[in-house]
Image (cartoon, rainbow, N blue to C red):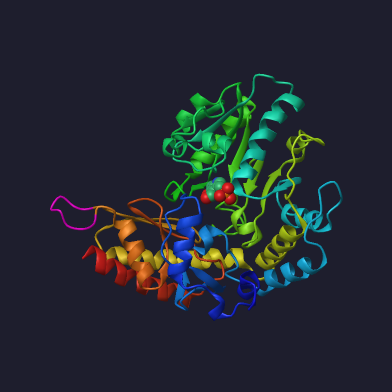
Amino acid sequence: MLHQAAALAEGAPEAHLPTGRIAELSHTYLMNTYSRAPIAPVRGSGARLWDANGREYLDFLAGIAVCALGHSHPAVVAAVQRQAASLLHCSNLYLIEGQALLAKAILDGSPFGKAFFCNSGAEANEAAIKLARKYARAVRCEEERYEIVTALNSFHGRTLATVAATGQPRYQKGFEPLPPGFRYVPFNDAAALEKAVSGQTAAVLLEAIQGEGGVHVADQAYLQRARQVCDERGALLVLDEVQTGMGRTGKMFAFEHYGIEPDAITLAKSLGGGVPIGALLAKDEVAAAFTPGTHASTFGGNPLACAAALAVVETIRAEGLVERAAEAGRYFAGALGALAGRFPQVAEVRGKGLMLGMELTPRSGDGRGPETPARAVAAACLVRGLLVNAVSDTTLRFLPPLVVSRADIDEAVAILEKAMAAVLE
Ligand SMILES: Cc1ncc(COP(=O)(O)O)c(C=O)c1O
């Protein structure tokens, strides 16, 4: 009999445990940090996933914006296989060919001059926070400039500093004391930002679209004013593009919608197409604050992750996926908007490109309809073979892969309509 890991690697359907057994093992042996739907995806291709029982799903969540090229894109698979066969890991004590090539590929044509690679979105934001503080002290010699201003309802990660940066008490509760030096302002409120940014502010850290916070889009005037305020007060403007980056919103980076240039951005999620990698990109002058020994990561930018990410970046460009995301996003948003004609509970469809949210009104005064309509509709979609996610009780979120076709979108909207009819009518 094959060893279990080898059997799974062979991909034979019979090699997979029944879903019930996977659930039992997970329950027994994994820390209870996630509410998991009771399906176990084991194989994917494009916008489709198959679970351990052989059931097919249309994946409109894409690993929460990770699988930008869809599942098992041949370019990523080939790059990972090639790299795994030659060199899996190499320490940052040495030059890493793939890391240098990846940095050039991402930075060329961007306003940024240097990259630092890590393993996740939280780590990329940690690096950004450290860089902003170090820049203030080491380059500008301003000892008192350490504060990071972030938005209420934001999400920046789960490490202690990024939980402190996240302007939502529910992620912070029970983990105090949090690192000091963070200040929060209401999102899309330029006057509040002006008041909060001072000579103590090292950086303003914002999402162009608050993803985990409910797909809330920053206003054009807000981000433009944020840029001005940062310039006037000597603070850096850092955008967290962990969810919005790499074409998701119909531009390679979401800041391109706003006619501004941040001093730095953070990336992760889609960057590796499913292989863990994060990145901090910064302008040369700011990046100069990091010198040998100031920041590091054992696995950051290792050959395997960089090979995958390079394949992702090259494929996004070669297949015109940024433009495709913009076009598919318009089509999808139109189809979601049309559902508002049938369901009065659809209060709003919002977002950019293929990062879309649908706001549903909860139970009305006459006691009809679910109290948590987004959760109920997401569950009804799952049963019907469509993966979407309720980012709150009332907000459904859609993050299909950038390679999604119109036929996939039509199919997803048809399933969604049935699910909404079952739950809302
Ligand atoms: C905007 C944003 N920043 C940071 C993170 C954290 O990324 P990770 O889970 O890779 O640490 C996320 C994850 O959802 C995110 O959406």
Provide residue 232's location: percent of width, then percent of height: 61, 27
Q: Classify residue 137 by image quadrant.
A: top right
The residue stretch that appears in magenta: 363-370
The reply to whether residue 46 is in sight is no
Nearer-the-camera pick, 160 or 145? 160
- Left or right placement of residue 245 versus residue 80 in this view: left
Q: Is residue 369 magenta?
A: yes
| Residue depicted at x 55% and y 52% | 243
Provide residue 22's location: percent of width, then percent of height: 48, 66
- Left or right placement of residue 363 versus residue 207 in this view: left
Question: Above or below — where is 414 with respect to 256?
Answer: below
Q: Classify residue 342 by image quadrant.
A: bottom left
| Residue depicted at x 50% and y 65% | 400
Magenta stretch: helix, strand or loop mostly: loop
Q: Is residue 275 magenta?
A: no
Question: Which residue occupies the extreme right position in the image?
Answer: 94
Q: Quadrant of the N terminus?
A: bottom right
Q: Quadrant of the C terminus?
A: bottom left
Provide residue 318's location: percent of width, then percent of height: 69, 69
